[in-house]
Amino acid sequence: MKSRILVAAVGVPVLLYVVLWGPPPLLLGALALLAGIGGNELYRCVGGERDTFLAVAAVLIPCMTVEWFYDRPQYVGVWFILSTLVVFTYAVFKGGAVRFHQIAAVLFGGIAIGYSFSSFLRIYASGVSRGYLLLPFILSFACDTFAYFTGLAIGRHKLAPKVSPKKTVEGAVGGLAGNVVCGLLFVFVMRHWFYGASGILSYGAMAVLSLFCGVVAQIGDLSFSLIKREFGVKDYGKIFLAHGGVLDRFDSVLFVAPVLAALMELMQVGWRCVGG
């Protein structure tokens, strides 16, 4: 618990500064760094760290995915195609020495993890208040925290025992409830302190969105737990001490962020249609 408090005491102020007040290049750098570390963690999880080329690709591809979304978003598809061709060409050249799970880890880490972290750039580019960049974190961390403490207090029925034995149905319900509470608090803060913030959701819409993102967050958490269990890994890394690595701490965020980015893009289209 002490290490968790230490990570929160240092990490929360840094997160708030980078997300709310940091210049765009700093936000880009932070997201690219997290994506690169996440890609490396996934590649090491599947036991592929011995191949230097793929180890470098596992870091480079997610970093560049985030950068391309920032600098040339219209050509991101080209980057995905090039990355896939290069990795498979290398695997063919190695004549079977590279296993498919290594290739899958590099490409999934590079494309999916990079895409997820770049979602913050798409939310930023949508024109809403920068306060909305906190929403993927709030609707992920709140669900994780409330689920943990609820499960600790009253958890009895296992949620997915073969994937994550400690998670309970009661904890999952507590996580959803906590998400709704924190989502409503977010709307309250945005309405009272971020004057003129664009795209403010109603309380009712936020309650529904919080519930939906709570489900998505728990799927994200269980999905990365499933990968760890398959390869016999306890934590993806140690960068956040007791919180583990980037993929341990941001597993839910990686699922929630692209969902929110897509929804905000749809809302922007709807507003333009109404305005037009």
Image: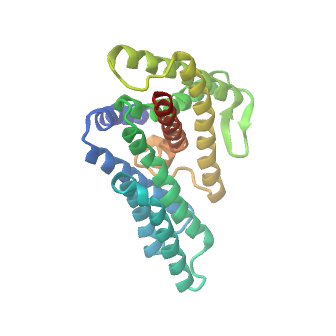
Task: Judge from the rendering whether residue 253 lies leftward or rightward of residue 240; answer left or right.
Answer: right
- Whether 62 is drawn above or below 92: the answer is above
**Display coloring:** rainbow
From this viewpoint, which residue is outermost toward the right?
A: 157
The residue located at (57%, 27%) in the rendering is 209
Residue 134 position, x and y percent, is 41, 32
Residue 49 position, x and y percent, is 48, 68
- Whether 78 is drawn above or below 170: the answer is below
Q: In which quarter of the image is residue 3?
A: top left
Work out whether residue 24 can be spotted. yes
Residue 66 position, x and y percent, is 40, 54
Residue 24 position, x and y percent, is 28, 44
Q: How many marks?
A: 0
Q: Nearer the viewer, residue 28 or 5?
A: 28
- Whether 132 is drawn above or below 201: the answer is below
Q: In which quarter of the image is residue 173?
A: top right
- Whether 98 is drawn above or below 164: the answer is below
The residue located at (59%, 28%) in the rendering is 147
Work out whether residue 152 can be spotted. no
Q: Nearer the viewer, residue 201 or 91?
A: 201
